[in-house]
Amino acid sequence: MASSTWTLIAAAAAIALLLLLVITCKMQEFLALLVTTLAFGLAVGTDPVELIDLVVEEMGGSLGQLALVISLGAVFGTVLQQAGAAERIATTLAGKFSDRNIAWGLSAAGFLVSISVYIDVAIVILVPMLYGIAQRTGKSLLYYGIPLCAGLSCAYTFMPPSPGPLAAAGIMDADLGLVILFGVLCAVPAVIVGGPLFGRLIARRIFVPVPAQLVGTGVGSVGAGTGSGTTDGGPASGDGGGVAAERPGGTALPGFASVVGALLLPLTLIVLGTIGDKALGEDSTWGTVLAFVGHPVIALLLTCLYTLWFFGLRRGATTAELRELAGSALGPAGQIILITGAGGAFGGVLVESGLGTVLAESMKDAGIPLAVFGFLTSSVMRICQGSGMIAMITGATFSAPLAHAMNAGSAQIALTTLAIACGGAAFSHVNDSGFWMANRYFGMTVADTLKSWTVMKTAVGCTGFAAVLVVGAFVG
């Protein structure tokens, strides 16, 4: 066992090595985490053969449930995306709000969409749909875009099965039901502050017109037209906003209620499973049933099968097309699984090194809460290397052994998971791919992107973290 001082030094050096490999050497994140894990284990005196066995064991252990959940979530999200779920949510909610209050509808739309669709993909799909509104009203594009992106960011931060919080929850061994329950509570103020409130403020200071190359192209018809046509969920609504009844390929958009129902189905099942387990216990028949259907794997499997039928076979897709679609979803999921597994292996080596005990004693003397440590760790990683996913995984990797040493309760672990996610979502700047997507699709200068996108992301992360601390004060 290495000395406490050397363990801390080795841990700091491991973070530096990880940043060096990812930022300077441009090494793939999975390989960088694996190399860092081995380097740290050897540095603290772990037997080389035992170290390899430990890495293999921890890699497999951390991916048991998580690999299934991430894979099922990826298929579920891809089917909804292909069916036009994002467009249906955005157009329907935009149509139900007046121009004066549409920012609130766009925030809600962004939040719902990003539960199942990667945030980068959602920006590509949804931001161009705002161009028509901005042209018609003459307002800054930021007046509509910031609330939408704040909603996207909040779902990515707070709501599994979004990959960031899901990966952090897996490494922290957090109760997903509690993460979802607390996540909803913390997301509400974060959406309000980072979305409609900040959007209105920044739109007064920075006028962003629709990108010149898109003016007059007909892109972005949300809020324009009569909304005639039909969908598979009933008549298309012409509620004042007008929605496109078909996608560019001619396929009818799904119904709004059916999309929202599919998005809420896995979350509802998981929460019911948590409630049933704690309120009824697994000894009762209903407790057993709720625990089974509410298990994250079963909840997402049922949802995945439902979406394949309702948004696939029922809409005329062939089994071959659905098989190809599901296969295409598993490629990106595989990268997330491997990176998360490497993070879990790193965390296992950190636990064996005794780092958790050392940090727990140091934090107890300094009076630093577990959630604050998680937020600061992921924030530093976010600022340094840009990837929110890597920031969340690293924050969870260093917080997990600490939570273990402190014997943290399930509520505290769930809140720490959200704090880690908040740190990984905030402080987006020029080393983040999302920053450049916003820069491109809003047609802004780098300076204006920093003043708008970066501040919005920081407001979402910091407001969410403040909400985590408030909720923590009540649940202990």
Image: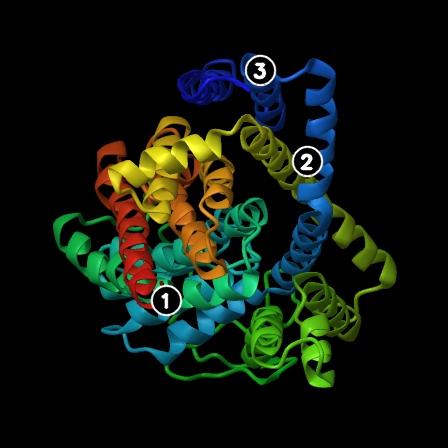
Seen at 53% across and 70% down, the residue is 88
Q: Earlier in the sequence, mark 1 or mark 3?
A: 3
The amino acid marked with disc number 2 is: Glu
Pick the residue in front: 391 or 119.
Answer: 391
In the displayed structure, would residue 394 be above or below residue 293? Answer: above
Residue that carries the numbered disc 1 in the rendered image: 475
Question: Residue type at mark 1?
Answer: Val
Q: Is residue 203 visible?
A: yes
Determine the residue positioned at 41% across, 84% down: 239
State how far apart marks 2 and 1 are (Cα): 31 Å
Task: Name the element at disc 3.
Answer: helix
Label 3 crowding class (10 Å Cα cut-off): few <14, some 14-19, many 20+? some
Which comes before the other along the chain, label 3 or label 2? 3
Residue receiving disc 2? 58
Check disc 2: other Cα within 10 Å, few if <14, some if 14-19, many if 20+: many
Q: Earlier in the sequence, mark 2 or mark 1?
A: 2
Q: Amino acid at mark 3?
A: Ala
Dot 3 corresponds to which residue?
Answer: 39
Give the answer, above or below, for where 407 lies relative to 184: above
Counting every numbered tag in the picture gives: 3
Q: Residue at x 54, y 55 (%)?
A: 174
State the quadrant of the N terminus.
Answer: top right
Q: Nearer the viewer, residue 286 or 233?
A: 286
Give neighbour class at mark 1: few <14, some 14-19, many 20+ (Cα, 10 Å): few
Distance in Å between CA atoms under marks 3 and 2: 16 Å
